[in-house]
Amino acid sequence: MQNEVLLQMRHITKKFPGVLALNNVDFTLRKGEIHALMGENGAGKSTLIKILTGVYQMDEGEVTVEGQPVIIRSPQDAQKGGISTVYQEITLCPNLTVAENMFIGRDEGMIVRQKERIKRSDEILTSLGIPARAKQQLGSCSLAVQQMVAIARAVDMQCKVLILDEPTSSLDDNEVNMLFGLMRDLRKKGVGIIFVTHFLEQVYEVCDRITVLRNGELVGEYLTQDLPQVELVAKMIGKELDELSSMGDTEGKEEAKKEVFYEASGLFSSDALPFDFSIRKGEVNGFTGLLGSGRSESVRAIFGADKVGGGSVKIKGEPVKITKPIEAMKHGIGYLAEDRKRDGIIAELSVRENIILALQVLNGIFKPISRSESEAFADEYIKALNIKTASRETPVGSLSGGNQQKVILARWLLTHPDYLILDEPTRGIDVGTKLEIQKLVLKLADEGVSVTFISSEIEEMLRTCSRLIVMRDRHIVGELKGQDLNQAQVMKTIAGGES
Amino acid sequence: MNKTNTVRREPLTDAALLMIITIGIFFGMYILAMIFLGGGFLRAQQVIDMLNDNVSLIIVSCGLTIVMIGGGIDISVGAVTSLVVMSCVLYLNNGGNIFVSILLALGIGLAFGAVQGFLISYLEIQPFIVTLAGMFFARGFTTILSVNPQKVAHEGFEKLRGTKIEIDLLGYTANNGNRVPARIELGVIVALLCVIAIFILLKYFRLGRSFYAIGGNQQSALMLGINVKRTRFMSYLICGLLSGISGYVFMMHTGAGNATNASGMEMNAIASSIIGGTLLTGGVGNVIGTFFGTLSLTTIKKIVVASGLNDPWWQSITTGGMLCFFILLQSVVLSRRAKKKKAK
């Protein structure tokens, strides 16, 4: 079955103002295969997917499904053509019920047959083992469950081509395994699955083939078993392979016997339980733990982003009070928030305006940054951080995720912080940019900036942090450094010793 | 799976919860009025009059509820109502036909709905701006038609207007011993039919559910394969149609056209929708709630008057207070739910 071509995209070209997003890209999907689409941020993966789902129209090229040319002008066209997509961000309506979310927008009569929908939804949910009820309001489910409902919807639509765009980024291991089981089932039924992810291990676990894109161009299509992981990374990021392997364990890891920059005791907020914490000048430490363990809530309390309840805070030994972000900023603290879209970028504003935002706030409204000054700042950081943008006046919303993240980093770097808190700075961005950000963190530490780093990928934390604070169920349950700083020990601490 | 015999009840949706609160408060308020103020509140005619006097408001509120569920706003409804009244009055006075006058009313409403809907949905102009322009346009046009109030002088229409459903059972005995039956105007029947029709549309029709989807998350709705632009267009079209109907029943109630007719009705309609549990942010709302929202607003006004606060500003102040109270209540209820969910 695997040799029967299901979907073929040929010579796809897509231009955006100032950027050639896709240049003459081919992509072939066969029946009953799981095909990984890999590439850095800005490689053109999202654009390719969006062309296939009718969000964007291609400038040149052709798409055929089972040999028939298809024209996809809207998501409806895509659905009718048997192409279903489950996106990274939940694209369901939280105000409707689970059953409605599974059936709305699909061909049917004028009148909704609720009972049938609910019955059918319950059947599907049960058969896929998804812990949701048909009549439940979707918004009351966890994000992972919402994601699975989206997949259930696609499955029920008898799609020929199923696109999974970063479906695993909000799922835990169990749920990922459940999803993979589902994907394998669908493969047996002859569905072609396009799997977009940043997790390499997952690619090797389920995918048959890999197509790699780089800078809007096709690098190649490979059978998974013929392409070792190291080579895949090399294909994705090009030249930087050497640096990846050489970025050793020793770098930036020596315990700095420097003065303590920030110290909190008994600090708590509306969302975080009381905790003690301190960081030295030029130190990189990390908060780790599962999602919901309280790691983000704790750093938000440090920055005063949530309502601070109490506790004492000292900066360079002096007692200070930080209850609002602006107070934290005045003490030289910067915070890169976890949710880039909500708490980070202002999508409609330009790259330049986003970059100067924090500095302007710090200066106050009576000391405006002049146009020429701000342009100079923007150009400097676009260059320094290698931000890929058409110009400094491009709206940030049109940049790829990794570049948006760099813009926010630039925003904080411009304020020359003494202490930078980075909450999931590498989530949902590609290997190349991840590496750049990790290197930047170590460089900042060298310059004497304290950094707190949070990431879901333990490996990444081990590479950058000299001290790891482990949280579980909203409490700090351990602090690892030196010898203990290895994957096994971290896992053990996160999971908890007692059984 | 382990299936027990006990039927598991789903927790209420946000919309249902808000609606139930409104209905509860309406009845609570009315019963308190009956106990403490007595008099008119004890007569069925009081409730019927609340309907008779507010048929227009009920109908445009239904329209606004639809638009607001879809995440939009329409502030032209009062002005369109007024334009419809004036146009139909003049048409009838020039020897028009009743049937055609109804078509005229619906036509004007649909025309406004279609043009505004097109500008908002397909050209993506802010709904507030578009309907603000529509409001000025309709008001201005009404004044051009006639600056002076115009009374309907049309035999057939007067007959239609005079037709009332009398129910003796709900009547009362006046001081002089005569039995006064309860009188329900035809407009009330129209309004109730509108409420029922919109209720069914919103609950059981694909289009109705799509309104909720685009109001809940426009991007998601698009990805789910809903034609967002057409759906949004339809919400304004239906709202326009309801404004047309509202104009006609307004004329049946007052029997005259006046350039200042229905002024401020759009704001009362927005208030009714919000009190009925419709969120301005879209995606949540229910037309039954809106119906009771209108009644609640009317009741509190009646209570204010019955308490001896006859000056008109007292009504405005209480309306404002009530709106504030409901919005506070909504936000408290919804944020408590959100917290509960988080705690899970």
Image (spheres, coloured by chain):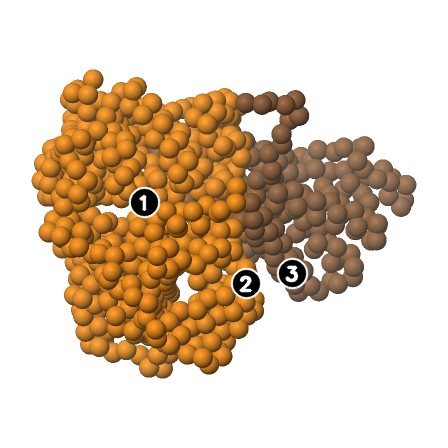
Chain colours: A orange, B brown
What is the crowding at mark 3: few (fewer than 14 residues within 10 Å), some, or many (at least 20)?
A: few
Residue B240 at x, y percent in the picture? 46, 43
Residues marked 1 and 2 touching at CB (< 8 Å): no
Of the image marks 1 and 3, the number of the one nearer the N terminus: 1
How far is the residue under mark 1 from the one under mark 2?
52 Å
Foreground pick, A316 / A478: A478
Which residue shows up at 52% across the image and 41% down it? A499
Residue at the limit of the structure toward the front, as seen here: A483
Residue B221 at x, y percent in the picture? 38, 39
Name the element at disc 2: loop
Name the element at disc 1: loop
In which quadrant will I find the C terminus of chain B? top right
Residue A47 at x, y percent in the picture? 21, 43
Q: Which mark is residue B321?
A: 3
> Dot 2 falls on which chain?
A
Three-letter code, disc 1: Tyr
Q: Nearer the viewer, mark 1 or mark 3?
A: 3
Q: Quadrant of residue A311?
A: bottom right
Depicted B116 relative to depicted A352: above or below? above
> Dot 3 falls on which chain?
B
Three-letter code, disc 3: Gly
The answer to whether tags 3 and 2 share a subunit is no
How far is the residue under mark 1 from the one under mark 3?
37 Å
Name the element at disc 3: helix
Q: Nearer the viewer, mark 1 or mark 2?
A: 2
Q: Which mark is residue A274?
A: 2
